[in-house]
Amino acid sequence: MESHAFAAAPAGSPRIESLPVEPLLTSEFDADPGSVYQRLRRTHGPVAPIGLMGVPVWLVLDYREVLEVLRSESVWRRDVRHWRARAEGRLPKDWPLLAGYEVRQTMFFDDDEHRAARRTYHSAMRPFQDGHTPEGWELRAAVARYADELIAMLAAESGTTGFTDLMAQYTRPLLLMVTTKLFGCPVELGDEMVMDLWRMLDGGPDAGAATARASAAMTRLAAHRRAMPGDDLTSYLLLSDPTLSDEQLGRELFMNAVYLNDITGNMVCNTLLEVLRGNATVRRSLSAGMIGETVNRAALVSPPVANMCFRFAARDVRLGNYWVRAGDIVSPSVAAAHQDLLAIGTSHIVDSTISTRAHLAWGAGPHQCPSAARELAGMIVTTAVGRVFEHFTKAELTLPPDQLPWRSGPVVRGLRLLPVRYELSDRSPVRRPVPVPRRGDVVALAPAPHTSDRQAHGLLSALRRLMFGARRSH
């Protein structure tokens, strides 16, 4: 890494280290992040100095400035080695957010290294992006089938009317089943992966050990698919770039598993929530059969990524009312930027029938989610949301929207649970009898699966133990 020539900002412009900073992650932020963003904007303008777990960070709040940061790769770098405080050893010992940024993975590459890695991803994902290819058609059919099976499992456990948590008993297991199929995980690896990814995403006391095990599992998956390639993303990544080591590919799979499960899962639940809480524009799109537009409108109100991954200034640059110094860390806030769009009110962006793709849920600029991945994630979200409203004739929240518990972190804001009272359609195929097994039993919830789906169906029994077993044991 070449050193930067840190040009001096105008005399008298304050450094972030000299400014009083307001901690971001507070109880107020957990309850109402929008009010925190508004107060910071009133006090500081488009860019505010905040404290993030003891580290001063520039939080970018306004839509225009967020786009500027996301689009200008030459000024705003992703590689953590550009961070001056890190290079000078001024970070708190064991700062919890640093470990993820130290991973040498596509998300944190710049320039030619980043472009080459994106070409590899695009080539590997292309077969799954197109619904007319065998791989794309099979994946789309599998997502719908998994959704039906999970609703069938719900009917078997709780009946065709009752209560459920659409996060724990539908969205999270659905995304883990899709991950298992897409990555080509063998059954035994699937059982291991589901347990550790859940522990990691929940951030519990054993999250560190679970993260290490999940990363090691992905490295073993890479070695397994190198020896036994199949029609899965892991094998196609190896085909696109045979120079990838098992460790490199394991890191890529690990990060993609996190984003596929957490970010895409948040988009599913946030969309369901906006419908259930009565968001008029979201409901109009759903009533018109425009599922994709329903997701876009929900992403405006409640983006699955509240604050994008850090960027690091390559040179001194004016941003908002402050000079950001070369090597400073900035966090572009999608959730705050979306407030600008929503504040326009009844304008064409928010309240018409045209697309609302102005949302930044997929990012923007050179590091935005690759087009093939966006198409794939969009298909998963629209299928997951669509199957709920196809099978459920009634679904209503059992808690007031302002009492729902959220996971509010430096990057992600997602529901901890989505409790609903439901009724299933008389015409729904999930009314077919499904045996209710004892805890630990392995049960097929559908006719014998396709050979390529065996790993996901093996995973289904593990998911069932997680979803229903704990409740029986109390």
Image: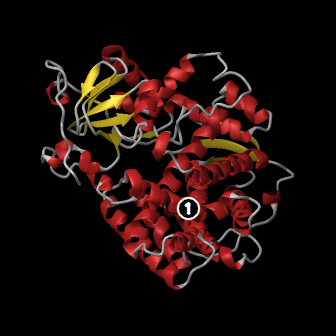
Along the line of sight, which residue is nearer the eye, 283 or 419? Answer: 283
In percent of the image, x 42 and y 69: which residue is there? Answer: 250
Using the rendered view, name the quadrant where residue 66 is placed.
Answer: top left
User: Residue 417, percent across and down?
Assistant: 52, 45
Label 1 sits on a secondary structure element that is: helix
Along the line of sight, which residue is nearer the eye, 342 or 46? Answer: 46
In percent of the image, x 18 and y 37: which residue is there? Answer: 6
Along the line of sight, which residue is nearer the eye, 270 or 319? Answer: 319
Q: How is the image coloured?
A: secondary structure
Q: Is residue 343 left or right of residue 42?
A: right
Amino acid type, label 1: Leu
User: Residue 268, percent across and down?
Assistant: 60, 45
Q: Is residue 464 in view?
A: no
Q: Is residue 334 left or right of residue 104?
A: right
Using the rendered view, name the quadrant where residue 357 is placed.
Answer: top right
Q: Relative to residue 286, is residue 338 depicted above or below?
A: above
User: Residue 441, percent across and down?
Assistant: 60, 76
Along the line of sight, which residue is nearer the eye, 225 or 113? Answer: 113
Name the outermost residue toward the right.
Answer: 427
Q: Is residue 433 in view?
A: yes
User: Residue 385, percent across and down?
Assistant: 68, 46
